[in-house]
Amino acid sequence: MTAATTGATGALGALDLAGCRPPTTTGPNAACASFPHGEIEEATVADLSARMQRGELTAVDLVDRYVARIEAVDRRGPHLRSVLELDPDARAIAAQLDAERRTRGARGPLHGIPVLVKDNIDTAGNTKTTAGSLALAAAPSTADAEVVARLRRAGAIILGKTNLSEWANIRSSHSTSGWSARGGLTKNPYALDRNTSGSSSGSAAAMAANLATLALGTETDGSIVSPASICGIVGIKPTVGLVSRRGIIPIAHSQDTAGPMTRTVADAAILLGVLAGPDPGDPATDGQRGRAAADYLAALRPDGARGKRIGLVRSYANIARPVMDVIDRAANDLRKLGAMVIDPVDIPTATKIDDPELEVLLYELKADIAAYLRARPGSPVKTLEDIVRFNREHGADEMRYFGQELFEKAVDKGPLTTAAYVEALATCRKLARDEGIDLALRKHGVDVLIAPTGGLAWLTDLVNGDAFTGSSSTLAAVAGYPSITVPAGMVRGLPVGISFFGPAFSEPLLISTAYAYEQATRHREKPRYLSTLGGLAPDGPA
């Protein structure tokens, strides 16, 4: 337990820290039967708001109960390490919001709702923003990111910061997702020896374990949807430019975005409605004017799949057959809901985009991280070169498991006027948009595309790094288009997600389709915190 966490827990008062009750089984596969405050497990924004409105619950109660669960699940018991630190002001802020509710009424659905925020999103006050790196640990951010400011104005409580794959997983091609020098390794709540994916690892694990009502993640390519899928939750990667990136430690401005990570589509829609909107500090948000929805809650229709033409994209390597069986069942469920599923929809460019995408990310990383650091007062590092130097000087802590070869490649890149960058960016947009998603939608006359979000959670290996098993995130990520992943079932006790994606600013269409599927199937299962799956291959025979 870190010093910051110890201080925060003390400031939040006396807690019920009963912890895990006796396990339901014995031996290496023992699972926790229950944790403190099971009454808030799977609670939604609507549930909690209604209870606070009726006077059955207060925001202070909620903060205390979630902090107790964090202590029992994250610091003890399974020791998930999904939460880096708690905000010591959270309880006092909750008390102020409770008083405001009594005297003036609620600001909206998020009034008094605790939210966890990924540690690459700036928060002012007594919490740090480090991207998991020790290089930024001594220089707290002095202002809230725009998305955090929006949450505070809506009455949400920033409960704390979540762990992540350090520097949002752009440091090394041999990294272990969910690990950072500051936070250690985040564990998967479904099987503790398996990976959470990343880079929004802590946000995903914390949501799966019911350590807050809502969480924020960020994505450049897969960093919301992949951990959401692997941890059995909902994640929305919005259209680039729908949500402000001001105050978020960047990788690449052409693909970066923040987005909701929740347990239900309805909660994700509520959170997206608060996050979305133009911001003068992020010019990319100018493009949403006249295109973004005014109300994402209107898309929450149980009949939202009826009459839709949906294309099933199968052309993703390394996706195990049992995962595709889950997706085939999902396609049949969508047909039962009144959708027409066109199967398959082929997108050949999906296999051609990795190299130009990496080129773009490395060029933009060098430029964008320097711009962010220049605007951060007191930062001891000001450029990517400074970070590389810091990591070498602190290699025992920062590079104990993997290196920084991607950082080193990015350092060698030129400015964003370089012909190689300009050409790679144009190639990416052509392959992902013109010859990718846009062509597939037009050619097959479909409204929405679906695909397996990715493979199953792999065994964490700090020696060899991630054993990544495939993903469908890249096309939407590179195009800057929206995608949403929803739980679709389980294979050998591990969650499988299905992704819905489409053209720019099609969030209402995707939410309505995903919501109808979620409500009809309800595949989300609470984690059991198994220490292991018992050595059974998750893609082996049933």
Image (cartoon, rainbow, N blue to C red):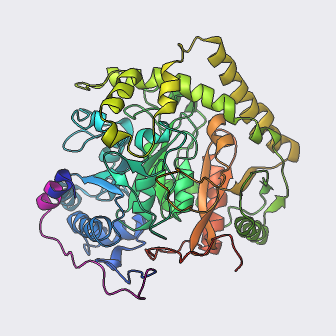
| Image position of 83 with respect to 246: above or below | below
Q: Which residues are magenta?
A: 7-28
Q: Position of residue 241 (x, y in %)?
A: 54, 33
Q: Position of residue 78 (x, y in %)?
A: 35, 70
Residue sitting nearer the eye, 525 or 28: 28
Q: Is residue 138 left or right of residue 452?
A: left
Q: Quadrant of residue 168?
A: top left
Q: Is residue 321 in the magenta section?
A: no
Residue at 68% of width from left, 66% of height from top? Answer: 303
User: The C terminus is located in which quarter?
Assistant: bottom right
Q: Position of residue 387 (x, y in %)?
A: 36, 27
| Residue found at the very far right of the displayed protein | 443
Q: Quadrant of residue 34?
A: bottom left
Residue at 55% of width from left, 22% of height from top? Answer: 363
| Image position of 291 with respect to 534: above or below | above
Residue 492 shows in the view: yes
Residue at 85% of width from left, 55% of height from top? Answer: 344
Q: Quadrant of residue 384?
A: top left
